[in-house]
Amino acid sequence: MPTLKPYLSFDTEAPSAPAVSQHRERPHAVVIGSGFGGLAAAIRLGARGWRVTVLEKLDGPGGRAYVHRRDGFTFDAGPTIITAPFLFDELWALCGKRREDDVELRAMDPFYRIRFHDGSWFDYCGDAERMKAEVARFCPADVAGYERFMVEAEKCYRLGFEGMSTKAFETVGDLLGAVPSMVRMRAWDSIYQLAARHLTDPKLRIVFSFHPLLIGGNPFSVTSAYSLIASLERRYGVHWAMGGTGALVRGLVGLLQGQGTPVRCNAEVRRIRVTEGRASGVELADGEVIDADIVVSNADAAWTYRHLVEPQHRRVWTDAKIERGRYSMSLFVWYFGTRRQYHDVPHHMLLLGPRYRELLTDIFKRKKLADDFSLYLHRPTATDPALAPPGCDTFYVLSPVPHLDSGTDWAARGEAYRDAIAEALEATVLPGLRQEIVTSFFTTPQDFQDRLLSYKGAAFGLEPLLLQSAWFRPHNRSEDVPGLYMVGAGNHPGAGVPGVLSSAKALESVLPDAATLRR
């Protein structure tokens, strides 16, 4: 398997720090990880008067949103769409700035093209009339059902996203307080059941229930509350950050620099130190100890508890409980650049294979690497040609696969799996692909575990099932270690860019006041 190497560097040195005497007066927070959740948490901490240090294992910031550069091509490693721009705008506003002065977010149209195995496709967008016309192409009788589905999605948005995403669920009382909303959303149903209740066409049922796959969930198991994504997208659109997702990472790092916060890369945390029963700092892999008043982990939640917090300090998140959790699928991601452009391919495309429900059962329940696959094809140069040399295209193609409990030897299987994907793409939407490729590399579930320190190589942490959501998910304030706080995909409210940014807002609601901890 190709070895991944860094191809994008950041200036991660902070500007001149305040005087030592000022440092002694400000409590210190260490943030582990510089994904979107960690960067957002660090900005919010800085705005509240904390002195902050961000520690990143990789050689550049971003976590799953890391950026690779090869042979003149720019590849975003992870998230590719922005669906809640206001969550970024809030971070810039906390620093007295405007996001649009640093990063342009360009609206996508369509949001996605969903291509079925028979060659038919559905162009998914934010315009209600065009969506009804697309629905009518497949089943005119389902137009009314689509409108009913969107009413349900809007209700889930108001109750689920607006009502719960930034609330830290800490007590059983918090959980009981959410029960009426859960009942109104019929949260015990799966999102596929919700779609099937309103739509008769099998393809349309897939179109309006696939969204949880973007955050690591099986549409046949994940709560119907996640229909809120459809409403979120229609309200705010789907956007692309010009320059790539890495432009947002650079912008957030710039905000931290303005606050005097260093982002230290190549700084892997080996252990969260616990002194007299509370988090007191971290120990790095090279043995360096950094003291802190609080520790905020943006690392994978299961990995944090299993590998960074010693067992004697864990009463809730024991090894046995961590192992019993149901984890999201993982991903095989192939990044490649072509010497020609494929103008018929939109920015975002889903290519569904011959099986749908059965493939998801293989991935999520049987933990079996199947011979067939469904794919997400990302062509950012459709919007942003600067991400490739002139006349070329940048791509990545993502295949959902089981996490490492499948037992797959990815070092042995990776190249063959990539070849199978290349053959499928060449036969459908990218004719002549293999002879056009000029640069290529891929990542596997093994990389998610070894490079990104994700438990079992799961790409999104715990699967977003009803009984692994809200109070049942790892809390934003650790249940086990006072002074330890959590943000990111594995914690409440969950994965996806809106989820991890919202976790930083939820964190803010349970943080101690920096003024009360001044030394």
Image (spheres, helix red, strand yellow):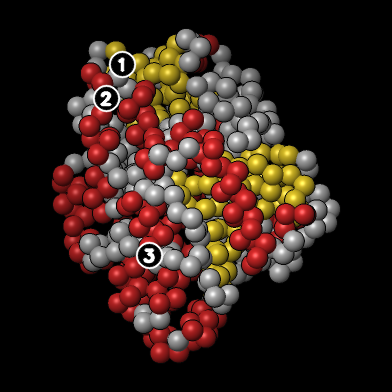
Q: CA distance from mark 3 to mark 2?
A: 40 Å
The residue wearing badge 1 is 274
Image quarter (top left, top right, bottom left or bottom right) of the N terminus:
top right
- Mark carried by residue 357: 3
Q: Residues within 10 Å of mark 3 (few under 14, many from 20)?
A: few
Q: Residue at x 20, y 64 (%)?
A: 183
Between 254 and 433, which is closer to the camera in this rendering?
433
Q: In the image, what residue type sits under mark 2?
A: Val
Mark positioned earlier in the residue sequence (1 or 3): 1
- Identified at 80% across, 58% down, the residue is 340
Q: Residues within 10 Å of mark 1 (few under 14, many from 20)?
A: some
Q: Quadrant of the C terminus?
A: top left
Q: Which mark is residue 481?
A: 2
Q: Nearer the viewer, residue 215 or 290?
A: 215
Quick one: SS at disc 1? strand
- Judged from the image, the secondary structure of the residue bearing numbered disc 2 is loop
Q: Are marks 2 and 1 in contact (CB under 8 Å)?
A: yes
Residue 440 locus on image (x, y percent): 69, 44
334 left or right, relative to 383: left
Q: Amino acid at mark 1?
A: Val
Q: In the image, 387: left or right of 152? A: right
- Whether residue 437 is visible to the viewer of this picture, yes or no, is yes
First in sequence, mark 2 or 1: give its number: 1
Amino acid beneath label 3: Arg
Measured in 3D between alpha carbons, the distance from the residue under mark 1 to the one under mark 3, in whole angstroms, is 45 Å
